[in-house]
Image: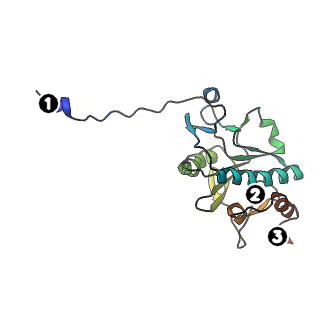
Amino acid sequence: MNTALLTQTLPRSAQAPERFTYSEFCSRIHEQKADLIHGEIFMASPATIKHEDSVDFLGAVLRVYVKRKKLGIVVGSRVAMKLSEEDAPEPDLIFVRQERMSLLGNTEIFGPADVAIEMISPGSRRLDAVEKKELYAAFGVPEYWLIDLQRQEAHFWRNEGGEWKDLPIDEHGIFRSSAISGFWLRVDWLFAAEQPDEFEIVQMILAGDPKDL
């Protein structure tokens, strides 16, 4: 008798992940933030207070600026970008130009936003920096911002034919968006121990580009 068949540990075959459509994703996910990528559901970990405070800060600055300039709409993380039947990520913030507002549904945008913004959370580094980045490029999101609060780094890219090209940060630490007309941001504001007043920041941005003043 081959006793090894009774005692030897046998490796099990890998199971393919369960795949979901967008309608199935919506029926399963209600209040919690999640992403549907290639038919797989990725549940978000509970956000830290710092993460939420930083998203709220940047979201407030963007919303007021975009509203004042009548450029479109900025919405938060419970709005999905339905890119296909198996791809519906929920970025932390998205910007949609006025000319494309017809793409907005009740709980989603049907197609790519003009800007997708992710702030890396505990456990989301690979998802945000690899899977989502590749997905956004493939489906034609024009601009992607990735903000890493833990490492205090920010990366900004412009989509050129499905490939990301770096958007520069100048010698004064200022980033200028190519997708949100006239919008600029001092990157250090995102990582300040005590974030500056949002209203004051918006006033500065609305006053014009610092290089022109």
**Residue 160, can we see it?**
no
Give the residue type that dot 3 points to.
Pro
Relative depth, front residue between 161 and 25 = 25
Q: Quadrant of residue 171?
A: bottom right
Q: Nearer the viewer, mark 3 or mark 1?
A: 1
| Residue 43 percent across, percent down from the top left | 57, 38
Would you call the spot at circle 2 few (<14 residues within 10 Å), some (14-19), or many (20 or more)? Answer: some
Pointer 1 residue: 3
Q: CA distance from mark 3 to mark 2?
A: 16 Å
Q: Which mark is residue 178?
A: 2
- Seen at 19% across and 29% down, the residue is 6
Quadrant assignment for the N terminus: top left
Give the residue type that dot 1 points to.
Thr
- Seen at 59% across and 49% down, the residue is 128
Give the residue type that dot 2 points to.
Ser
| Residue 132 percent across, percent down from the top left | 59, 46
Q: Which mark is residue 210?
A: 3
Relative depth, front residue between 147 and 50 = 50
